[in-house]
Amino acid sequence: MNEYDTNRIYDTVKDIGYHKTGNHLDADCYLLNTCHIRDKSKEKVFDEVGRVRKNYKDKKKPILIIAGCVAQAESSEMIKREPYIDIIIGPQSYHKINKIIENFNFQKKVELTEFDTEGKFNYLDKIKNNESKVSSFLTIQEGCDKFCSFCVVPYTRGPEYSRPFKRIIEEAENLVKNGTKEIILLGQNVNAYSFKDKERSYKLSDLILELDKIKELNRIRYTTSHPKDMTDDLINCYSISKKLMPFIHLPIQSGSDKILKLMNRNHKVEKYLEIYKTVKQKNHNVEFSSDFIVGHPGEIDRDFEDTMNLVKEIKFINSYSFIYSPRPGTPASKLEAVDKEVAKERLINIQKVLESHQIDKNKSLIGTSIEVLVENKLKNQTRYFGRNTFFNSVIFEGENKHIGKLIHVKIEKINRNTLFGKIDEKKNMRAA
Ligand code: SAH
Ligand code: SF4
């Protein structure tokens, strides 16, 4: 989402004459868009600010802006710790950035951290999203009302807000006009999307089925969803939609009901397994990925074993796993932490199994011909980059004419994250 936000900030500041500089040491204005989800992200921001300060030592100081969730959560504390920072702007206030930059003087620091999500999107809807990538993000929903005990998002992105259905379709049509072939619908809780106008109410499934009708669009994805909002209408899309990709990133976080309760996730493991089975019944090709948190307060060996058992049962093809990171102000941060070494060992163990499943899945593709949406040529290489239906990276020898096209690639080699192959001329000729 930060990538989407950064592009929209850029679309906005173009109006006041700001452009991306070819050399980042020449910038009049330096903006860091930040993430607060784990503690490391905050430290990375301060490291980066330190680097900027050093790099500009003998140059004119740029206006240094911190945007995003670290800005929202830490606000004035950031300026106290690092006075080189000039402007703090939260994720629901960045539509005001032009006024702030235009009126800025170095004597007065600025902080803007209101939750004005509706105002932001009303403003942004007037500025076209001119992204012209083969695969583009499109934010449809922001914020979260779920308050998982470990998570900072409800405090940094604010309450759930869903954009008007028609505005989203217009933005999608504009992206497709500019050459987009794949749209990734975004939201902190994307499947909680819910919008009502005078005529009717709309859910994520309505958006998917409407996007399905856009002729030049090839692929639809969405992320990130919550098991509680995985409703039947959405699951049905896996058998109805021709463009929805057969891959669901559906974080469960833990395989222990006790920990799910402590996390305030509001569902049990059973519910997740039920979703998995129903989706598979609708479309057997669908694969799952998840996020896992290990070492959440209260997690004992038995709970971790439950998580490992779930991992072995579902065989997620791609997942993210993290050691629990206490976030200031969240309920879990007040509970007693799990021993750091124990948490580290659990992370190593879960990653080993997750990786082996990922490799098994990739190995099973060797020798097969898979459909790839070609995105770009790799920098300083003759090879091209695209993704298969499961969102794996695919690298192959191609040509410029393939960019933006769906082609077949025969897989020859794999590693954990990437598939390597050659264009399958025979199959492509047949498809043409
Ligand atoms: N809305 C999504 C998750 C968004 S945050 C959901 O409900 O699943 C992205 C991921 O970051 C989470 O799935 C979780 O695994 C991880 N995460 C969030 N807070 C964390 C914390 N305090 N410590 C470690 N990982 C965390
Ligand atoms: Fe955070 Fe996701 Fe839980 Fe919302 S649903 S509080 S974003 S983990």
Image (cartoon, rainbow, N blue to C red):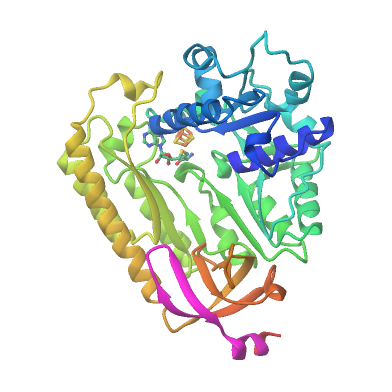
Q: Is residue 271 visible?
A: no
Between 156 and 269, the one lying in front of the other is 156
Residue 168 location, quadrant: top right
Which residue is painted at 74% across and 50% down in the image? 131
Q: Is residue 94 above or below residue 314?
A: above
Q: Is residue 278 above or below residue 154?
A: below
Which part of the image, by quadrant, shows the N terminus?
top right
Which part of the image, by quadrant, shows the C terminus?
bottom right
Q: Which residues are magenta?
A: 410-429
Provide residue 147's location: percent of width, then percent of height.
45, 28
Which residue is painted at 43% across and 58% down in the image? 288
Between 273 and 79, the one lying in front of the other is 79
Provide residue 295's location: percent of width, then percent of height.
25, 36
Q: In screen coordinates, is 11 left or right of 337?
A: right
Q: Is residue 28 above or below residue 88?
A: below
Residue 302 location, quadrant: top left
Check residue 413 for magenta coloring.
Answer: yes
Provide residue 280's location: percent of width, then percent of height.
45, 65
Q: Is residue 334 visible?
A: yes
Provide residue 406's location: percent of width, then percent of height.
65, 73
Which residue is painted at 30% across and 19% down in the image? 334
Residue occupying the far front of the picture:
58
Q: Is residue 219 above or below residue 85?
A: below
